[in-house]
């Protein structure tokens, strides 16, 4: 592999990383490098980094960690930070980092031409998307009963709903989008109705919800699309059996569209390798990298010209996504968390 991968470690180890980067011998300092702090933990991304190095000759040093730890570290390092780029999932998290003044403005005609307006800001870009969909048990629920997110709070869904914690960013961002479209009062009424319809207390991740629906423990759940695609592509017989019992709905197709979230990145304000960082950002929007997000991690490209060969994504079909600019999600995230807390969605 042509890049250095640094697994998630303690902050002490991260400090050693900084020391090694800042104190490198002068001969090594001339070598083109890019230092990435990443909260995106997918093994399938390894080839992405390797391909960038192979194409450009720029070596990647990467520190993996939790988003909160990485943001705090960048703040503490200040002007001495070796980090060039921050990568994370969830638009609200990217906006939070931007609100702290961590990102530098991005000037790139390539990114302006390839990434849609609603999926980029002056300081960060989305490079892949995923949708928050409804999954239902075909033997227990009829498709027409769950065409919209609001339908999950209907009396007909009493004791039927499985979902992960209301404090998880995937659900908070969905709540933020609903507040933007439906208003706070209606979103709170929905959250209370959702809680009243729980088949069990929230637990586990999205894959656990899908499997619970397949097993009949609940009739319907909310999940990110790439978890479903992953199970559709699985060679495990139990996953294939589970997927044969469930179906998906693209919510809100007759109104504001299915909620989407993103993976994204920004160039840091004190990046020591800004030219390499911009080259990497533009690489993320290349057809090659975009196809990789689709085929390697079951996400949708943000670039329209990128061909999707992923059989699971093709099987799931096309849908109308929410056109709300993803940066707007951060504006109502705090409200969404308060709404969920009042509704008892823990």
Image (cartoon, grey):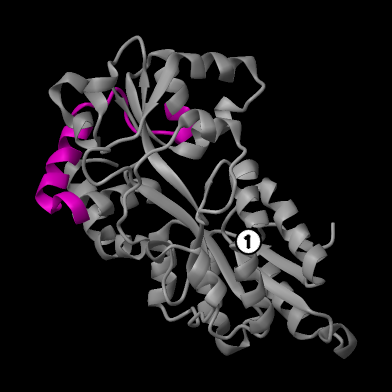
> Toward the viewer: 93 or 150?
150
Residue under the image location 63 percent in, 26 percent down: 234
- Rendered location of residue 44, percent (x, y): 68, 46
User: Which quadrant holds the N terminus?
Assistant: bottom right
User: Which quadrant holds the C terminus?
Assistant: top left
In magenta segment, residue 190: yes
> In the figure, 8 relative to 278: above or below?
above
Region of the chain picked out in magenta, as a range: 180-209
- Rendered location of residue 301, percent (x, y): 53, 51
Q: Residues within 10 Å of mark 1 (few under 14, many from 20)?
A: many
> Toward the viewer: 70 or 226?
226
Residue 81 left/right relative to 203: right
Residue under the image location 43 percent in, 67 percent down: 120
- The main secondary structure of the magenta stretch is helix
> In the figure, 238 relative to 99: above or below?
above
Q: Which residue is mark 1?
A: 286
* Mark 1, secondary structure of its residue: loop
Instruction: Tell me if I can see residue 273 in this picture.
Output: yes
């Amino acid at each position: 592999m042509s890049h250095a991968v640094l697994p998630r470690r303690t902050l002490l180890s991260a400090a050693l990383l900084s020391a090694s980067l800042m104190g490198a011998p002068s001969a090594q300092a001339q070598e083109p490098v890019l230092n990435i702090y990443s909260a995106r933990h997918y093994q399938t991304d390894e080839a992405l980094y390797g391909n960038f190095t192979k194409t450009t000759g720029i070596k990647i040093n990467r520190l993996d960690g939790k988003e909160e730890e990485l943001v705090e570290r960048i703040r503490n390092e200040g002007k001495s930070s070796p980090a060039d780029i921050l990568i994370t999932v969830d638009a609200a998290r990217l906006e939070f980092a931007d609100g702290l003044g961590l990102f530098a403005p991005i000037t790139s005609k390539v990114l302006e031409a390839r990434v849609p307006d609603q999926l980029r800001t002056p300081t960060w870009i989305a490079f892949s998307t995923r949708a928050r969909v409804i999954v239902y048990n075909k033997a227990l629920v009829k498709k027409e009963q769950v065409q919209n997110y609001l339908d999950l709070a209907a009396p007909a869904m009493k004791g039927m709903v499985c979902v992960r914690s209301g404090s998880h960013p995937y659900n908070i961002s969905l709540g933020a989008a609903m507040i933007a479209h439906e208003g706070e009062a209606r979103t709170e009424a929905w959250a209370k109705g959702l809680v009243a319809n729980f088949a069990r207390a929230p637990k586990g991740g999205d894959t656990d919800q899908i499997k619970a629906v397949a097993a009949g423990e609940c009739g319907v759940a909310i999940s990110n699309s790439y978890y479903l695609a992953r199970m559709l592509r699985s060679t495990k017989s139990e996953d294939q059996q589970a997927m044969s019992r469930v179906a998906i709905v693209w919510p809100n197709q007759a109104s504001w569209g299915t909620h989407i979230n993103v993976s994204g990145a920004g160039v840091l304000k004190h990046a020591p390798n800004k030219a390499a960082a911009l080259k990497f950002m533009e690489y993320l929007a290349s057809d090659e990298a975009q196809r990789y997000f689709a085929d390697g991690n079951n996400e949708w490209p943000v670039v329209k010209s990128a061909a999707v060969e992923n059989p699971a994504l093709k099987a799931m079909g096309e849908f109308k996504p929410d056109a709300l600019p993803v940066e707007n999600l951060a504006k109502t995230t705090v409200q969404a968390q308060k709404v969920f807390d009042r509704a008892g969605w823990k």
